[in-house]
Image (tube, rainbow, N blue to C red):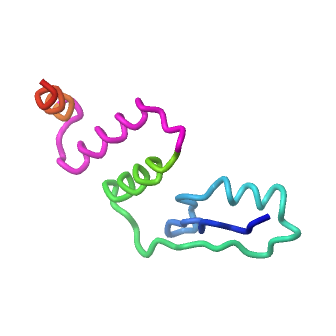
Amino acid sequence: EEGQQEPIILLPGNLIFDGERRWRAVAEYLQPEIATLDAVMLPKELSEEELHARTLLTSLHRENLNELDLAEGLIQQAKLMLKIEQEEVVKALRRAIA
């Protein structure tokens, strides 16, 4: 009714990074009426850290994000950025809280 509000974000190789629900909706329900979708292609291959950071940022905008999923994502991001084991991240968080 209002058109596409957000573009689909694609990784190199045309893999959908963000916008799968928009793509499925068009593919399943609106195909005859919509010839094209707006999309943004990420310019390069992303490292594991960059991909996780972008995924986490995308998830943070969801209204129904489970708090445990958020905590797990933040711990995983700290692990990747600091290049330490998950247990070290958890220990550091416990010390900071104490």
Query: Range of the magenta residues?
Result: 63-87
Q: In the rendered view, does 43 fall on the left or right side of 32? A: left
Residue 64 location (% of width, % of height): 54, 38
Q: Quadrant of the N terminus?
A: bottom right
Q: Residue lying at the far right in this picture: please name it.
A: 32
Name the residue rendered at 43%, 47% in the picture.
Answer: 60
Q: Residue lying at the far top in this picture: please name it.
A: 98
The front one of 88 and 13 is 88
Residue 95 painted magenta: no
Residue 83 location (% of width, % of height): 18, 47
Q: In the rendered view, does 25 fall on the left or right side of 10? A: right
Name the residue rendered at 43%, 34% in the picture.
Answer: 69
In the figure, residue 49 lies in which quadrant? bottom left
In the rendered image, the vertical position of residue 56 relative to residue 64, given as above or below? below
Q: In the rendered view, does 61 fall on the left or right side of 92? A: right
Q: Quadrant of the C terminus?
A: top left
Residue 69 painted magenta: yes
Q: Residue lying at the far front in this picture: please name it.
A: 2
Name the residue rendered at 25%, 47% in the picture.
Answer: 80
Q: How many marks do you count on the picture?
A: 0
Residue 92 location (% of width, % of height): 14, 32
Q: In the rendered view, does 63 fall on the left or right side of 50? A: right
Dominant secondary-structure state across the stretch colored magenta? helix
